[in-house]
Image (cartoon, rainbow, N blue to C red):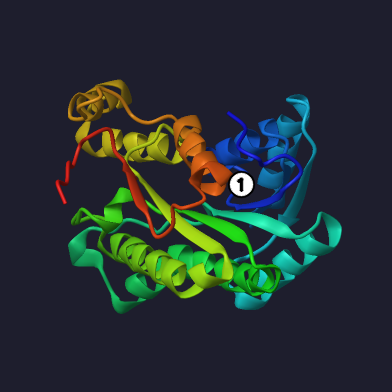
Amino acid sequence: MDLELRDKVVLVTGGSKGIGLACALAFAREGAKVAIASRSADNLAAARAELERAGYQVYTHAANLSDADDAQKLVDAVEAQVGPIAVLVNSAGAAQRYAPATLTPQSWRDAMDAKYFPYINAMDATIKKMVGRGKGAIVNIIGAGGKVASPFHIPGGSANAALMLASAGLANAWGSKGIRVNAINPGATHTERVQGALKAESELTGKSTAELLQAREQSIPLGRLAKPEEVADAALYLASERASYVTAALLTMDGGLHPIGA
């Protein structure tokens, strides 16, 4: 199936690790011109090396996307050095988890700066460019925590929920200009972040990370965590011409853990 992504410029925020890096590799395999952004120059260098070992070129740019000016500079630099951005994939940022008793007003603000505003700032800067061209696709990789409340992920889950509404709202607002905005809500995905969470839980409970992983997988109807590459495949479809009439969609990928009938 031809996804018609060859030679299109794709910007992946948070593209140096985890799901973002999997997206960068997936779009590169489709022949897209890929640019990745991250706050960490070291992580970008490692991601570039991995992509180059796989035979792909990539443009990298260090940026703090919680700052709107930095986001605008990123988008301007990619368009100047790579070309007009056809696809934006947002996968940057993760909010810290807190025990409910430790929450403060700053916890909530930090969560928005960590997850909500990086996506909003990247979209704002990119949509301005896309509107003039009358075409563009945005895929926001958000997280199932915005639909299912967890007592240890309330600020981060709230940021995710806000991003879901923003994604649907922007899709509605800019659809007439040829811009599609969709979101993916992964459940637990086998990344370094999840591995770190398992390690922290292991230290608290005394159970091994293998035991904890097995218990988590057994709770999922499909019997395992998602692979980053599987989330990337969904992003490929939503960004492609095969999804030309799909916009304002919120795709949950949690292995059937929280089935919703409507």
Would residue 128 appear left or right of 172 to someone viewing this image? right
**Percent of width and height locating residue 94:** 44, 55
**Percent of width and height locating residue 113:** 47, 70
Label 1 is placed on what type of residue?
Gly
Q: Which residue is mark 1?
A: 15
User: Which residue is depicted at the point 45% across and 35% down?
Assistant: 191
Decide: is 28 above or below 244.
Answer: above
User: Which residue is depicted at the point 54% across and 40% down?
Assistant: 236
In terms of image quadrants, where is residue 127? bottom right
**Percent of width and height locating residue 125:** 64, 72
**Percent of width and height locating residue 75:** 71, 65
User: Which residue occupies the foreground of this view, 235 or 6?
Assistant: 6
Decide: is 53 above or below 92.
Answer: above
User: Which residue occupies the foreground of this view, 76 or 178?
Assistant: 178
User: Which residue is depicted at the point 24% across and 65% down?
Assistant: 102
User: Which residue is depicted at the point 20% across and 27% down?
Assistant: 221
Let me know if residue 19 appears in the view: no
- Give the mark count: 1
Residue extending farthest to the right is 81
Residue extending farthest to the left is 261
Element assignment for label 1 = loop
Quadrant, the N terminus: top right
Let me know if residue 238 appears in the view: yes
User: Which residue occupies the foreground of this view, 41 or 24?
Assistant: 24
In terms of image quadrants, where is residue 257? top left
Q: Give the crowd class for mark 1: few <14, some 14-19, many >=20 residues within 10 Å.
A: many
Decide: is 126 above or below 260.
Answer: below
